């Protein structure tokens, strides 16, 4: 079994998949490779062997613009960077959307209204971020019950000259736990409609948000890039604000009056297709293991000399 050192300091979980042991406590000098999950890390620059940066934030995310990230992008080869929008399919790793043991909750008792579970407010300059601005138009609507981090939403500021900080009028409370924990889906299952829009709309960007609404058995209110609609979302059913002129009132009215069972039936079938299955947590670790094995056993075939910065366009904003 190959050994891979996980560089993330907050990670305490050992993962064994596909003949590879991913271990945060491993001695890097005895490992066949090191991997950083999401964040850029200086250790990647210093490691002499196989090094991997597995990033899954959108290409417009600010973390790619830090000094360390820019240096990594200029020094790492394409085969040392894994991403859902990687130009080489051998190094494409999707964003995790679900855990395989979660079930779809069709029979839950539901309120006939909408919910959004969001803790990322978008920061002080949220109105300058097109994706967040669109998302916030919907999750801050009075017809939506908003849950999320009390700390973050207490510091939220509406747009305008010297706006005071404070929770939005539709904020109803905190939801403890990780955003992908079982409690999030169980809370969503108490509502007919879930507003689950991404923080940005760009090619191939698809996270856990839509899948969680489906697992909750709710009607998703969601807007996606054309590549996502024609790709992983093929066969799914949702309410798209684009069909209603991005008007929150018209969109939410359509969602709340839609037949719930029709959406549940369509999305239950969609959730079982191969493309969705590949975004499950276990499948992703198996894919990572396969990439590691390839880099160790077939370096001549797998190594790509082109640098990340020369081959991938990192965007500052996506409209």
Image: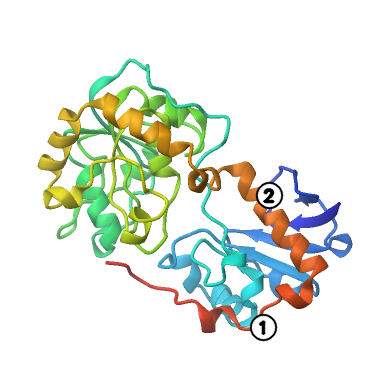
Residue at the image position 49 percent from the left and 44 percent from the top: 276
Q: Are marks 2 and 1 in contact (CB under 8 Å)?
A: no
Residue at the image position 58 percent from the left and 74 percent from the top: 68
Residue at the image position 15 percent from the left and 44 percent from the top: 248
Residue 71 rendering spot, x and y as whole percentages: 59, 79
Label 1 secondary element: loop
The residue at which mark 2 appears reads as 286
Residue 127 rendering spot, x and y as whole percentages: 23, 60
Residue 80 rendering spot, x and y as whole percentages: 66, 71
Q: Nearer the viewer, residue 156 or 276?
A: 276
Residues under labels 2 and 1: Cα distance?
Answer: 25 Å
Residue 241 is left or right of residue 196, and the answer is left
Residue 175 is left or right of residue 83, and the answer is left
Q: Nearer the viewer, residue 125 or 199?
A: 199
Residue 134 is left or right of residue 306, and the answer is left
Residue at the image position 49 percent from the left and 65 percent from the top: 85
Number of callouts: 2
What is the crowding at mark 1: few (fewer than 14 residues within 10 Å), some, or many (at least 20)? few
The residue at which mark 1 appears reads as 305
User: In terms of image quadrants, where is residue 46?
Assistant: bottom right
Sequence-wise, which precedes: disc 2 or disc 1? 2
Residue 218 rendering spot, x and y as whole percentages: 32, 30
Task: Work out whether 153 lies above or below 266.
Answer: below
Q: Is residue 274 visible?
A: yes
Task: Work out whether 212 lies above or below 306.
Answer: above
Residue 53 is left or right of residue 244, and the answer is right
Q: Is residue 218 visible?
A: no
Residue 253's disc is none
Quadrant that contains the C terminus: bottom left
Label 2 secondary element: helix
């Amino acid at each position: 079994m190959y050994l891979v050192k996980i560089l993330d300091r907050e990670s305490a979980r050992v993962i064994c998949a596909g003949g590879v042991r991913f271990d945060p406590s491993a001695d890097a000098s005895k490992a066949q490779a090191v991997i950083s999950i999401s964040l850029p890390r200086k250790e990647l620059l210093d490691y002499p062997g196989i090094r991997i940066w597995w990033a899954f934030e959108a290409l417009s995310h600010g973390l790619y613009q830090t000094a360390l990230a820019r240096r990594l992008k200029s020094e790492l080869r394409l085969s040392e960077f894994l991403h859902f929008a990687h130009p080489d399919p051998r190094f494409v790793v999707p964003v995790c959307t679900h855990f395989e043991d979660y079930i779809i909750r069709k029979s839950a008792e539901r309120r006939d209204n909408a919910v959004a579970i969001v803790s990322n407010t978008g920061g002080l300059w949220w109105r300058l971020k097109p994706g967040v601005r669109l998302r916030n138009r919907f999750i801050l609507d009075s017809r939506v019950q908003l849950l999320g981090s009390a700390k973050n939403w207490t510091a939220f500021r509406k747009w305008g000259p010297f706006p005071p900080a404070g929770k939005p009028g539709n904020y109803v409370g905190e939801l403890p736990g990780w955003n992908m924990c079982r409690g999030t889906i169980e809370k969503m299952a108490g509502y007919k409609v879930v507003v689950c829009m991404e923080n940005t709309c760009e090619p191939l960007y698809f996270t856990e948000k839509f899948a969680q609404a489906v697992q909750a058995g709710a009607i998703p209110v969601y807007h996606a890039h054309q590549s996502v609609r024609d790709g992983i979302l093929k066969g799914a059913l949702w309410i798209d604000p684009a069909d209603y002129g991005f008007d929150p009132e018209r969109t939410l009215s359509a969602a709340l009056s839609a037949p719930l069972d029709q959406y549940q039936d369509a999305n239950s079938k969609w959730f079982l297709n191969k493309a969705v299955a590949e975004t499950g947590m276990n499948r992703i670790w198996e894919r990572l293991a396969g990439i590691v094995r390839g880099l160790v056993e077939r370096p001549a075939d797998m190594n790509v000399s082109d640098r990340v910065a020369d081959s991938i366009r990192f965007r500052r904003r996506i409209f």
